[in-house]
Image (cartoon, rainbow, N blue to C red):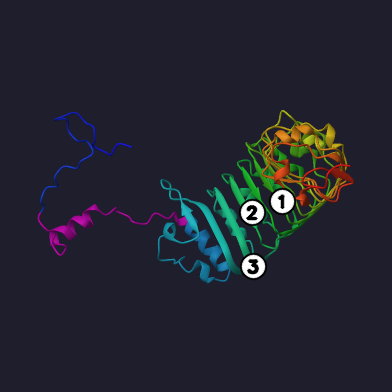
Amino acid sequence: MRRAGEGRAPGAPNIFSLPDEPRLPPINYNSPRLLLSFFLLRPASAILCHPEDKEVLLRIKSSLNNPYLLASWDPDADCCYWYCLKCHYKTHRVISLFFLAYDLPGQIPSAIGDLTYLQSLTLHKLSNFTGPIPESFTKLKYLNFLSLSWLNLTGPIPSFLGQLKNLTCLNLSFNKLTGSIPDSLSTIPGLGYVGLDRNQLTGKIPASLANLKGNDLYLILSHNSLSGELPATFAGVDFGKLDLSRNRLQGDASLVLGRNKSTYHIDISRNQFEFDLSKVDFNESLTTLDMNHNKIYGSIPKAMAGLEFQLLNVSYNRLCGEIPVGGRLQSFDYTVYFHNRCLCGAPLDSCK
């Protein structure tokens, strides 16, 4: 590789070299004139924080019994410089609030709903937090990112979340939420990430979730007690990532697969799905396929040898026949295939 400045024509200027710096006199930082100029250049008001937001934030702090996490929330300081939040660079309204990994007893303060310009709210790993999701959140009309995870939240997933029409991401994972998945989530036009995993949800997956229109759609429902068959409407959904693992689902899950889809991650493991794998078409973008611990039968189709799997697991099913040779199918450990009815061929024992 040619170094900067090499190979230029004779006499041409070197655009990579710096001009000689002028010699400046030393600065006297004690000069009254300099101090006066600093003062004159200072904004007329250095307070950026909106007074309404500041009042709400102090109510939030008080409702949480003034935790050390919010020690920077000094009433005499500009709230746009407090920790755990972010202000808009022009309007100076609070647009982001985030409490992370702290021992914070109590419930979600309903006053958060009064931060009406909030766009992002993250509450994560707050031990000793409990209670429901407050209905005051319906006032957060600009909210596009809502993550309430590892909080021990209880009660149902409230249907009023469907009123947050600007949401693109909803993460309620690692809580103790109960009941069914509300249909109202499907009415949020740009919702592209739905993470409801590791709760205590029951009932069927609502067919209305097929109406989710977000880009690169993520639907994460693993580690619940969901039951019944998958909605037939899922056949027309092009998921980016779909995780239904560790539920009580049954029936034909092959409808979420298909040659014309762009899905790259599917995990339907540890359910009671039952379908013929040999009749399934696969899309070329699929890199993760976990189907272990189901009742899937048939054989492994030869088309799977043409896929660039990074993760594959078909163990603990009812598959038979020879494992196709090619692609990455022989690069996986035998545990990816074992405990089937009569699968054979590398990396399992040879077929007889």
160 or 192: nearer the eye? 192
Which quadrant, please, contains the C terminus?
Answer: top right
Amino acid type of the residue tagged 2 in the rendering = Ser
Amino acid type of the residue tagged 1 in the rendering = Leu
Mark 3 / mark 2, whichever is N-terminal? 3
Q: Which mark is residue 174?
A: none
Q: Is residue 17 visible?
A: yes
| x then y, percent, for residue 276 | 87, 36
Cβ atoms at labels 3 and 1 below 8 Å apart: no
Give the spatial CA distance, label 3 vs label 1: 19 Å
Residue of label 2 = 136
| x then y, percent, for residue 66 | 54, 70
Mark 3 / mark 1, whichever is N-terminal? 3
Foreground label between 3 and 2: 3
Q: Would you call the spot at circle 1 few (<14 residues within 10 Å), some (14-19), or many (20 or more)?
A: many
| x then y, percent, for residue 60 | 56, 63
Q: Is residue 248 left or right of residue 151?
A: right
Q: Give the residue displayed 22% in from the left and 36% down from the top.
A: 15
Residue of label 3 = 127
Mark 2 / mark 1, whichever is N-terminal? 2
Give the spatial CA distance, label 2 vs label 1: 21 Å
Amino acid type of the residue tagged 3 in the rendering = Ser
Which quadrant, please, contains the N terminus?
Answer: top left
Q: Which residues are magenta?
A: 25-52
Residue of label 1 = 196
206 or 42: nearer the eye? 206
Badge 2 marks a residue whose secondary structure is helix
Q: Is residue 238 left or right of residue 58?
A: right
Badge 1 marks a residue whose secondary structure is loop
| x then y, percent, for residue 205 | 80, 44
